[in-house]
């Protein structure tokens, strides 16, 4: 198997690089081809870099010479730090089998990794406190869908997962096939956020036998017995650790070797401040006694069967306690010298018993890996009726389409708004007759497939209305206008999304061209479709032609509600970039109305006053005033573009990539038109039209002569368009968790990377 591992491999931390090496070597010993995905976060690299590279010249070679001089200066002024940096970089780039360095999640997503399996772990990769918020890269939010995803001994580094991170974990754990963690507390926390089994396994350093480390380690040139003291903190002085070391040195008479330049012990033999990972292992292997607040300092003390004391880490003692407890030596976790027994012989370790326990735990851990590597993918199983929101309360499984509410024969279902402003179904058990219709019509999971082309479909065009007046009034190429005019002319009715007088975003039915004009323009807010489906069904039964336009998930809900095909129904889905919170939109409108002392009467997200590719946000007030701002800079629009305020299901959308859409026709902006069809590029706006079936083609033929058309392909049309679920990051959760506590414009600006530094 080809296996890619993502972990904290680039930290200049002994435990981090050694656990990465251990998992690499174990998997290699099992016959797999293994690579460490060299994900190097700038925030991590900045902790350890020797200097800030200066680039005073335009010529690359001259700047390289400047960097060399900077390095030489550091060698002279800080020789220990320079050697340590050099040793770690050597280990990372040579001893670990790494890919090329990658510093951004966006870069990871672009690389076409050919791994059969990706493994996240070990180390504290799921500790948001270390990564400035949980990083989706460590939840394997990249790579091919068909790649099996496994976590091995991932640690959250805390007793609990903060609530602000819950939705992010729940989102990405859905894509894991097998999950294991390093501590019981982590298992408890993760199990609350996934329905998958979570297993506790050993840190990968404990998978290898001592002989493997004997080949790696480099023994120190120290001829006498010593206590090795290791402080894992980069800057913090651990007074408890130092006091323990002083006491043990006093009692045993042994001198101290330690890793801190900023501290001197009474009975100090030497400092180990510039060593390699191999030397770190050597110092522990040859110590008479080890005292550490380091998890991996403890681990290697156990591997080399040293006498040791573990001083609890001030932030995260649980992983140490769990390890020592599972091996039957938790009494070696001692916080202060006062807790030491008078007779140190009470701390003698029965390493035969410890090794027996380790081998048992190792067997369980190896068993997990074997099962995960050889077992089937579990993340793409078919969705059943038992997987619906009513039973799981999984916010990613509800599209808010109202289909369940509309189909309920006893009106037992009410859509209730949550704290983020999104509505979810709640069943009144007293009214419920358990007919199960709600589960049967729920569209979740029923369209989770990737269709290939069927006969001649999809047929794809770049399209632009021939009328300048229509183009001026449309968001892009004027496609929807031609459609609704056709339906209205046939005595039919059109369904679309509009603003109410109170600027709420809803689905409605129009029977005149004038009424249909309210449907024009992009509305990047989740629209309420209450009561529309029953009205549409009645029209269809009466033989009235109906054009139903909307997001793919809403059209899926309509089709499931109707439960049969109608020749007089034409469904047109919009290429959707997800839908924003109605509550955030409502709060932002209230802010603007207070600021302008006037009621909003229109909100254009994409006014083409400066051209189609450079849209402006235009808000019109009853007073006649107008807010005109570049869309990319507006606080609300930026929050939407950065995917920070969308409905949870948008982050797992099953409608984002199929070639054949749910609707008869798919329409949207033809982004990238200048590259794919330069002869069609025009600042008045260009649309994609994708015909998905014969019914849609017959409808299209009725108005196609109103457009300038160029035949395209699915691949060209979607090269720069929305074709996958939007990414979920911690910023989304951070923003949404504060909408009731921080004034909305200030909050949105805090997350607007183009304006947050403006006052």
Image: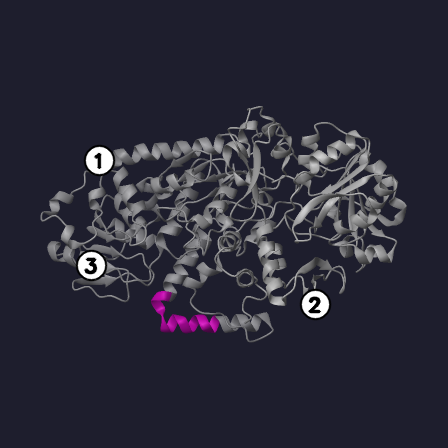
Query: What residue sits 22% from the left and 34% below the top?
Result: 353
Using residue 527 as the reference point, say whether residue 709 is left or right of it. Answer: right
Disc 2 crowd, CA 10 A, few/some/many (<14, 14-19, 20+): few
Residue linked to disc 2: 625
* Quadrant of the drawing holding the C terminus: bottom right
Disc 1 crowd, CA 10 A, few/some/many (<14, 14-19, 20+): few
Query: What residue sits 57% from the left and 54% below the top?
Result: 584
The region drawn magenta spans 68-81
Q: Is residue 62 above or below residue 37?
A: below
Q: Which label belongs to residue 550? A: none
Determine the CA span between mark 2 and mark 1.
82 Å
Q: Is 74 contained in the magenta span?
A: yes
Q: Nearer the viewer, residue 321 or 369?
A: 321
Q: Nearer the viewer's eye, disc 2 or disc 1?
A: 2
Secondary structure predominantly adopted by residues drawn in magenta: helix
Q: Could you say where residue 428 lies in the image, as x and y percent from the top left?
A: 52, 32
Residue linked to disc 3: 256
Determine the CA span between mark 3 and mark 2.
75 Å
Q: Nearer the viewer, residue 189 or 595?
A: 595
């Amino acid at each position: 198997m080809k296996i890619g591992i993502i972990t904290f491999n680039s930290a200049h931390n002994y435990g981090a690089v050694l656990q990465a090496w251990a998992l690499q070597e174990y998997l290699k010993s099992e016959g797999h081809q293994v690579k460490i995905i060299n994900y190097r976060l700038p925030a991590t690299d900045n902790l350890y870099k020797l200097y800030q590279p200066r680039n005073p010249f335009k010529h690359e070679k001259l700047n390289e010479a400047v960097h060399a001089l900077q390095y030489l200066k550091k060698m002279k002024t800080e020789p220990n730090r320079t050697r340590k940096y050099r040793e770690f970089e050597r280990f990372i780039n040579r001893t670990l089998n790494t890919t090329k360095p990658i510093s951004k999640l966006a870069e990871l997503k672009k690389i076409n990794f050919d791994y059969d399996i990706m493994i996240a772990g070990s180390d504290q990769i799921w500790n948001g406190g270390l990564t400035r918020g949980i990083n989706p890269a460590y939840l394997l939010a990249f790579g091919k869908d068909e790649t099996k995803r496994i976590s091995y001994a991932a640690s959250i580094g805390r007793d609990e997962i903060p609530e602000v991170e819950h939705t992010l974990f729940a989102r990405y754990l859905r894509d894991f096939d097998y999950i294991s963690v390093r501590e019981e507390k982590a298992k408890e926390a993760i199990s609350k956020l996934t329905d998958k089994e979570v297993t506790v396994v050993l840190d990968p350093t404990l998978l290898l036998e001592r002989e493997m480390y004997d080949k790696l380690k480099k023994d120190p040139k120290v001829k006498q017995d010593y206590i090795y003291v290791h402080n894992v903190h980069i800057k913090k002085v651990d007074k408890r650790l130092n006091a323990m070391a002083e006491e043990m040195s006093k009692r045993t008479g042994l001198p101290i070797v330690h890793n801190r330049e900023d501290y001197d012990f009474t009975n100090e033999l030497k400092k180990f401040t510039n060593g390699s990972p191999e030397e770190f292992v050597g110092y522990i292997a040859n110590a008479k006694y080890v005292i550490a607040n380091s998890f991996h300092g403890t681990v290697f003390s156990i591997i080399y069967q040293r006498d040791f004391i573990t001083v609890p880490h001030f932030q995260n003692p649980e992983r140490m306690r769990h390890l020592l407890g599972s091996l039957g030596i938790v009494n070696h976790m001692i916080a202060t010298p006062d807790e030491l027994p008078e007779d140190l012989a009470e701390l003698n370790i029965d390493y035969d018993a410890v090794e027996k326990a380790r081998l048992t735990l190792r067997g369980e851990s190896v068993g997990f890996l074997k099962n995960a590597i050889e077992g089937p993918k579990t993340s793409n199983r078919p969705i059943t009726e038992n997987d619906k929101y009513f039973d799981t309360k999984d916010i990613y499984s509800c599209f808010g389409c109202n289909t369940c509410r509309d189909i309920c024969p006893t009106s037992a279902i009410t859509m209730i708004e949550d704290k983020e402003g999104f509505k979810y179904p709640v069943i009144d058990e007293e009214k419920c007759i358990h007919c199960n219709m709600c589960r049967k019509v729920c569209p979740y999971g029923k369209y989770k497939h990737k269709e290939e082309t069927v006969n001649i479909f999809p047929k794809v065009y770049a399209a632009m209305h021939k009328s300048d007046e229509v183009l001026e009034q449309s968001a892009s190429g004027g496609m929807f206008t031609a459609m609704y005019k056709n339906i209205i002319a046939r005595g039919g009715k059109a369904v679309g999304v509009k603003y109410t007088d109170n600027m709420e975003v809803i689905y409605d039915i129009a029977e005149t061209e004038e009424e249909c004009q309210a449907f024009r323009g992009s509305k990047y807010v989740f629209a309420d479709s209450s009561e529309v489906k029953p009205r549409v069904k009645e029209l269809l039964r009466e033989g009235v032609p109906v054009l139903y336009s909307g997001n793919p998930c809403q059209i899926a809900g309509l089709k499931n509600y109707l439960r049969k095909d109608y020749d007089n129904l034409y469904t047109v889905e919009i290429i959707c970039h997800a839908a924003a919170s109605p509550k955030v939109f409502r709060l932002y409108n209230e802010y603007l109305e207070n600021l302008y002392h006037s009621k909003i009467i229109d909100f254009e997200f994409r006014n083409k006053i400066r051209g189609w590719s450079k849209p402006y946000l235009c808000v019109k007030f009853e007073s006649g005033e107008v807010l005109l701002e570049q869309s990319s800079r507006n606080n609300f629009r930026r929050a939407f573009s950065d995917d920070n305020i969308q409905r949870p299901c948008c982050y797992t959308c099953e409608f984002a990539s199929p070639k054949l859409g749910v609707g008869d026709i798919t329409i949207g902006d033809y982004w990238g038109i200048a590259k794919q069809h330069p002869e069609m590029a025009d600042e008045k706006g260009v649309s994609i039209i994708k015909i998905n079936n014969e019914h849609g083609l017959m409808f299209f033929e009725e108005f196609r002569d109103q457009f300038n058309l160029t035949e395209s392909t699915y691949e060209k049309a979607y090269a720069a368009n929305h074709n996958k679920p939007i990414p979920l990051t911690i910023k989304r959760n951070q923003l949404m968790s504060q909408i009731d506590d921080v004034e909305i414009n200030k909050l949105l600006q805090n997350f607007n990377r183009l304006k947050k530094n403006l006052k």
